[in-house]
Image: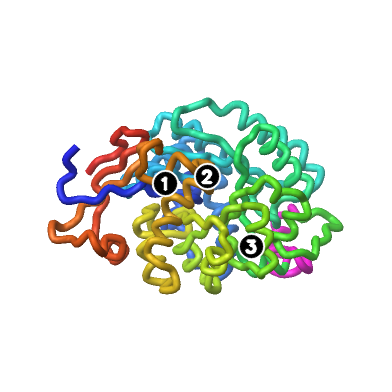
Amino acid sequence: MDWGSSVILPGLVNAHTHLELTRLHKQLTGAGCFTEWLSQVVRRRRDWTRKEYADSARQGADMALASGTTLVGDVSASGLTRKALESGKLRKVVFEEALALAPEGVDTALAALDARILKAETAPLSTGGVSPHAPYSVSPQLYRGIARIARQRAIPLATHLAETRAELEFLQSGTGEFRDFLARLGVLPPGWTPPSLAPVAYLDSLGVLEQSPLLIHCNYLDPDSIARILGRRCSVAYCPRSHAYFGHDAHPVRQLLNAGVNVALGTDSLASNDSLSMLDEVRFLSRERKDLKGDEIFRMATLNGASALGFGGVLGRLRRGYWADMTVLSLPENTSSKYLISQILEGAGECIGTVVQGEIAWRK
């Protein structure tokens, strides 16, 4: 192929998104309170049909491909995404989500999750995983059960963790906006008591971190949490623009990288972002975080993302023996190769081709 004046990159990896929420773009109001935003998500999708979920996921997958993404880590609450995308050209790991805070809901949730995994058809570009939603929505028993499924079936596990200060308060003392939110929904079990632990230490106490899961967000971490993440060989999915949307404190990405933790990048969903483009994501991150080097940012969006999703050693590099997933960006004729990364991060380059498994999956 003659792509003209262009640069070929390892395929961009979106380590965390919710493709089935694509149709929520610009449908939600405000980001001042996380639980209010979460309430809107629940209300908006309550009456969606199976077709609406599937169409939304396919629309998101098309957007990802058209912006140079070759691999996504997608979390599906509906259980419909993997089927909807099985014939698509985007490589994906679809994490089937489960939640139940009441102990009596564990067996039902585990049975439903196992059925979804067994029902999923094998497709060349699709891999399955499991995702206990978050510590404020998943009981200890359910976390342990899902970790057991991941271990027995040898599939990856991902979970939202340490996303808000309110989550930390809820786990430490059982108070705050999450208690009010769960009580309003009627899902807070009678007599529920908090573990009185930080989120990472809590999951470690349950044995969940022994699976080396992908930990999504990790916006609020102390030194002990970072040490546990490193010691358990967990990866972290950092979503810069979603992080900014909610107005969180500065993300501890620098501390995580300095410690040697594998940090990948994600867009999260269009319910809290303006695009599913990883190019938009890395350019935003480059502008906002001057403590990160350009090559670190590109590594998080390629090699680190591949490793976080279980494709270490086969994706994320242009090298003999690696799979042919590539992103092609057009560049002005006079672009200097000496400062290529910095120029791309500053805005040079438009995606004109996405190659997955050696096939052109999308071309402008």
Q: Of the numbered discs in the image, which one, if any, rests on residue 309? A: 2
Foreground: 3 or 108?
3
| Left-right relation of 161 to 284 | right
Residue depicted at x 38% and y 49%: 12
The answer to which image quadrant residue 167 occupies is: bottom right
**Pointer 3 local density, CA inside 10 Å: few below 14, some 14–19, many at least 20:** many
CA separation, marks 1 and 2?
11 Å
> In the current view of this chain or complex, which residue is farthest to the left?
333
In the picture shown, does residue 251 fall above or below 45? below
CA separation, marks 3 and 1?
27 Å
> In the current view of this chain or complex, which residue is farthest to the right?
191
Colour setup of the view: rainbow
| Left-right relation of 332 to 305 | left
Q: Of the numbered discs in the image, which one, if any, rests on residue 316? A: 1
In the picture shown, does residue 163 fall above or below 46? below
The percent coordinates of residue 35 (x first, y second) are 61, 63
Q: Earlier in the sequence, mark 3 or mark 2?
A: 3
Residue position marked by numbered label 3 in the rendering = 162
Q: Main secondary structure of the magenta part?
A: helix
Q: Which residues are magenta?
A: 170-187
| Left-right relation of 291 to 113 | left
Q: Which amino acid lies under the numbered mark 2 shown in the image of this protein?
A: Leu
Residue depicted at x 76% and y 67%: 172
The percent coordinates of residue 93 (x first, y second) are 51, 40
- Mark 2, secondary structure of its residue: loop
Q: Is residue 36 visible?
A: no
- Mark 3, secondary structure of its residue: loop
Q: Of circles 3 and 1, which is in front?
A: 1
Residue depicted at x 70% and y 47%: 210
